[in-house]
Amino acid sequence: MTIHAADPISRAGVLSQLRQFPEIALADDDTPQQDGGQVALLLSCTVDKTVLLSLRRLVLAGDVRAVLVVDRMREADLLDVAGCGVTSIVWRREATPARLLRAILATHRGNGDLPADLLGTLITRVGRLQNSSPGPAGHAPVGMAPREVDILRLVAEGLGTGEIAVKLAYSERTVKNVLHNLTSRLQLRNRAHAVAYAVRAGYI
Protein backbone atom coordinates (compact mmCIF):
# COMPACT_ATOMS: atom_id res chain seq x y z
CA MET A 1 0.00 0.00 0.00
CA THR A 2 1.03 3.64 -0.36
CA ILE A 3 0.67 6.55 2.05
CA HIS A 4 0.02 10.11 0.91
CA ALA A 5 0.18 13.13 3.22
CA ALA A 6 0.73 16.86 2.78
CA ASP A 7 3.71 16.91 5.13
CA PRO A 8 6.55 14.44 5.82
CA ILE A 9 5.93 14.34 9.59
CA SER A 10 2.37 13.07 9.17
CA ARG A 11 3.48 10.49 6.63
CA ALA A 12 6.29 9.30 8.88
CA GLY A 13 3.85 8.97 11.77
CA VAL A 14 1.49 6.74 9.78
CA LEU A 15 4.42 4.66 8.52
CA SER A 16 5.67 4.09 12.05
CA GLN A 17 2.18 2.98 13.14
CA LEU A 18 1.76 0.49 10.29
CA ARG A 19 5.23 -1.05 10.16
CA GLN A 20 4.31 -3.29 13.10
CA PHE A 21 1.79 -5.19 10.95
CA PRO A 22 3.42 -7.85 8.72
CA GLU A 23 0.18 -8.24 6.72
CA ILE A 24 0.68 -4.77 5.21
CA ALA A 25 3.27 -4.30 2.47
CA LEU A 26 4.29 -0.63 2.53
CA ALA A 27 5.70 1.12 -0.53
CA ASP A 28 8.93 3.06 -0.08
CA ASP A 29 7.67 6.23 -1.75
CA ASP A 30 4.52 8.16 -2.66
CA THR A 31 4.34 6.80 -6.20
CA PRO A 32 1.37 4.44 -6.66
CA GLN A 33 2.41 1.03 -7.91
CA GLN A 34 0.36 -0.71 -10.53
CA ASP A 35 -0.30 -3.93 -8.64
CA GLY A 36 -3.80 -5.31 -8.31
CA GLY A 37 -5.83 -4.59 -5.21
CA GLN A 38 -3.49 -1.91 -3.87
CA VAL A 39 -4.70 0.35 -1.07
CA ALA A 40 -3.77 4.04 -0.95
CA LEU A 41 -4.12 5.90 2.34
CA LEU A 42 -4.52 9.67 2.08
CA LEU A 43 -4.12 11.82 5.19
CA SER A 44 -5.66 15.32 5.25
CA CYS A 45 -7.02 17.90 7.67
CA THR A 46 -10.17 18.49 5.65
CA VAL A 47 -11.69 17.84 2.23
CA ASP A 48 -11.10 20.43 -0.48
CA LYS A 49 -10.69 20.46 -4.25
CA THR A 50 -7.05 19.41 -3.99
CA VAL A 51 -7.93 16.39 -1.86
CA LEU A 52 -10.74 15.36 -4.21
CA LEU A 53 -8.39 15.68 -7.19
CA SER A 54 -5.77 13.57 -5.40
CA LEU A 55 -8.34 10.89 -4.59
CA ARG A 56 -9.54 10.72 -8.18
CA ARG A 57 -5.95 10.52 -9.45
CA LEU A 58 -5.09 7.71 -7.04
CA VAL A 59 -8.15 5.62 -7.84
CA LEU A 60 -7.94 6.18 -11.60
CA ALA A 61 -4.20 5.42 -11.67
CA GLY A 62 -4.86 1.70 -11.48
CA ASP A 63 -6.59 -0.96 -9.43
CA VAL A 64 -6.41 1.19 -6.28
CA ARG A 65 -8.83 1.43 -3.36
CA ALA A 66 -8.64 4.49 -1.15
CA VAL A 67 -8.74 5.09 2.59
CA LEU A 68 -9.18 8.70 3.71
CA VAL A 69 -7.96 9.79 7.15
CA VAL A 70 -9.37 13.23 7.88
CA ASP A 71 -9.80 15.64 10.80
CA ARG A 72 -13.21 16.91 9.75
CA MET A 73 -15.60 16.77 6.84
CA ARG A 74 -18.67 18.77 5.87
CA GLU A 75 -21.85 16.86 5.13
CA ALA A 76 -21.76 18.22 1.57
CA ASP A 77 -18.32 16.62 1.02
CA LEU A 78 -19.40 13.08 1.82
CA LEU A 79 -21.01 12.22 -1.51
CA ASP A 80 -18.10 13.86 -3.38
CA VAL A 81 -15.64 11.68 -1.48
CA ALA A 82 -17.71 8.56 -2.14
CA GLY A 83 -17.89 9.53 -5.80
CA CYS A 84 -14.10 9.55 -5.93
CA GLY A 85 -14.09 5.86 -5.09
CA VAL A 86 -13.25 6.12 -1.39
CA THR A 87 -14.39 2.99 0.40
CA SER A 88 -13.16 3.79 3.91
CA ILE A 89 -12.94 6.92 6.05
CA VAL A 90 -11.22 7.16 9.44
CA TRP A 91 -11.45 10.17 11.73
CA ARG A 92 -7.92 11.31 12.51
CA ARG A 93 -8.71 11.44 16.23
CA GLU A 94 -9.57 7.71 16.06
CA ALA A 95 -6.62 6.70 13.87
CA THR A 96 -4.91 4.25 16.21
CA PRO A 97 -2.77 1.52 14.61
CA ALA A 98 -5.54 -1.05 15.16
CA ARG A 99 -8.20 1.25 13.65
CA LEU A 100 -6.05 1.95 10.59
CA LEU A 101 -5.33 -1.74 10.12
CA ARG A 102 -9.06 -2.54 10.23
CA ALA A 103 -9.86 0.08 7.59
CA ILE A 104 -6.98 -0.96 5.33
CA LEU A 105 -7.83 -4.66 5.43
CA ALA A 106 -11.55 -3.99 4.90
CA THR A 107 -10.74 -1.75 1.94
CA HIS A 108 -8.40 -4.33 0.45
CA ARG A 109 -11.22 -6.89 0.61
CA GLY A 110 -13.55 -4.41 -1.09
CA ASN A 111 -15.82 -4.03 1.95
CA GLY A 112 -15.05 -0.49 3.06
CA ASP A 113 -15.23 0.93 6.58
CA LEU A 114 -17.07 4.10 7.60
CA PRO A 115 -17.53 5.59 11.08
CA ALA A 116 -21.08 5.06 12.33
CA ASP A 117 -21.79 8.81 12.41
CA LEU A 118 -20.72 9.23 8.78
CA LEU A 119 -22.80 6.26 7.68
CA GLY A 120 -25.83 7.88 9.30
CA THR A 121 -25.01 11.16 7.55
CA LEU A 122 -24.70 9.33 4.23
CA ILE A 123 -28.12 7.73 4.67
CA THR A 124 -29.69 11.09 5.54
CA ARG A 125 -27.97 12.83 2.63
CA VAL A 126 -29.05 10.24 0.08
CA GLY A 127 -32.58 10.30 1.50
CA ARG A 128 -32.74 14.05 0.90
CA LEU A 129 -31.54 13.57 -2.67
CA GLN A 130 -34.18 10.91 -3.22
CA ASN A 131 -36.94 13.20 -1.93
CA SER A 132 -35.81 16.21 -3.96
CA SER A 133 -34.76 14.38 -7.15
CA PRO A 134 -36.89 11.33 -7.86
CA GLY A 135 -35.53 8.95 -10.46
CA PRO A 136 -36.67 8.94 -14.08
CA ALA A 137 -40.14 7.60 -14.68
CA GLY A 138 -40.26 3.98 -15.76
CA HIS A 139 -36.95 3.05 -14.09
CA ALA A 140 -37.92 0.85 -11.17
CA PRO A 141 -35.17 -0.15 -8.79
CA VAL A 142 -33.82 -3.70 -9.01
CA GLY A 143 -35.47 -5.80 -6.31
CA MET A 144 -33.78 -6.84 -3.08
CA ALA A 145 -34.48 -10.02 -1.18
CA PRO A 146 -35.69 -9.70 2.44
CA ARG A 147 -32.43 -11.24 3.66
CA GLU A 148 -30.43 -8.59 1.78
CA VAL A 149 -32.52 -5.81 3.26
CA ASP A 150 -32.13 -7.21 6.78
CA ILE A 151 -28.35 -7.30 6.42
CA LEU A 152 -28.17 -3.78 4.93
CA ARG A 153 -30.26 -2.37 7.78
CA LEU A 154 -27.68 -3.69 10.23
CA VAL A 155 -24.82 -2.39 8.07
CA ALA A 156 -26.53 1.01 8.22
CA GLU A 157 -26.51 0.77 12.01
CA GLY A 158 -22.73 0.36 11.95
CA LEU A 159 -22.55 -3.37 12.72
CA GLY A 160 -19.64 -5.44 11.40
CA THR A 161 -19.85 -8.78 9.64
CA GLY A 162 -19.52 -10.82 12.84
CA GLU A 163 -22.12 -8.77 14.69
CA ILE A 164 -24.57 -9.08 11.79
CA ALA A 165 -24.03 -12.85 11.69
CA VAL A 166 -24.83 -13.16 15.40
CA LYS A 167 -27.85 -10.86 15.17
CA LEU A 168 -29.42 -12.76 12.27
CA ALA A 169 -28.15 -16.24 13.22
CA TYR A 170 -26.19 -16.54 9.97
CA SER A 171 -22.59 -17.57 9.47
CA GLU A 172 -20.10 -14.80 8.68
CA ARG A 173 -19.52 -16.46 5.30
CA THR A 174 -23.25 -16.17 4.53
CA VAL A 175 -23.26 -12.46 5.40
CA LYS A 176 -20.21 -11.85 3.21
CA ASN A 177 -21.69 -13.87 0.34
CA VAL A 178 -25.01 -12.02 0.49
CA LEU A 179 -23.27 -8.64 0.42
CA HIS A 180 -20.88 -9.71 -2.34
CA ASN A 181 -23.72 -11.06 -4.50
CA LEU A 182 -25.79 -7.93 -3.89
CA THR A 183 -23.02 -5.48 -4.77
CA SER A 184 -22.05 -7.54 -7.84
CA ARG A 185 -25.62 -7.86 -9.09
CA LEU A 186 -26.40 -4.17 -8.71
CA GLN A 187 -22.89 -3.04 -9.74
CA LEU A 188 -22.34 -1.23 -6.43
CA ARG A 189 -18.85 -0.30 -5.22
CA ASN A 190 -19.05 -1.25 -1.55
CA ARG A 191 -21.31 -1.59 1.51
CA ALA A 192 -21.83 2.14 1.88
CA HIS A 193 -22.91 2.35 -1.76
CA ALA A 194 -25.30 -0.58 -1.18
CA VAL A 195 -26.85 1.17 1.84
CA ALA A 196 -27.24 4.36 -0.21
CA TYR A 197 -28.93 2.38 -3.00
CA ALA A 198 -31.28 0.71 -0.53
CA VAL A 199 -32.26 4.11 0.92
CA ARG A 200 -32.91 5.59 -2.51
CA ALA A 201 -34.97 2.56 -3.51
CA GLY A 202 -37.06 2.80 -0.34
CA TYR A 203 -35.97 -0.48 1.22
CA ILE A 204 -34.52 1.19 4.34
Image (tube, rainbow, N blue to C red):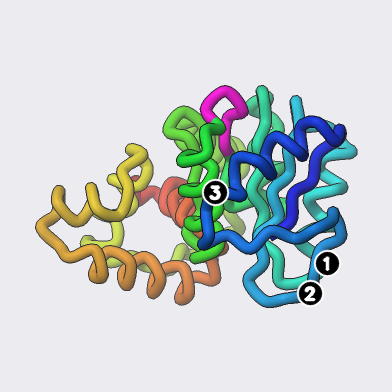
Q: In the image, 187: left or right of 49?
A: left
Q: Give, as a three-letter code, the residue at label 3.
A: Gln
Q: Give, as a three-letter code, the residue at label 2.
A: Gln
- Which residue is under mark 3? 20
> Mark 1 falls on what kind of element?
loop
Q: Is residue 193 visible?
A: no
Gap between marks 2 and 3 measured at Cα: 24 Å
Q: Is residue 132 visible?
A: yes
Depth check: give the residue in front, 12 or 3.
12
View extreme (left): residue = 169
Name the quadrant of the C terminus: top left
Mark 1 vs 3, N-terminal side: 3
Residue at point 85%, 48% (across, down): 54
Mark 1 vs 2, N-terminal side: 2
- Which residue is under mark 2? 34
> Mark 2 falls on what kind of element?
loop
Residue 12: x %, y % from top left: 75, 38
Residue 61: mark: 1
> Which of the 4 quarters of the picture holds residue 51?
top right
Is label 2 in contact with label 3 (beta carbons under 8 Å)? no
Stretch of the chain drawn in magenta: 90-94
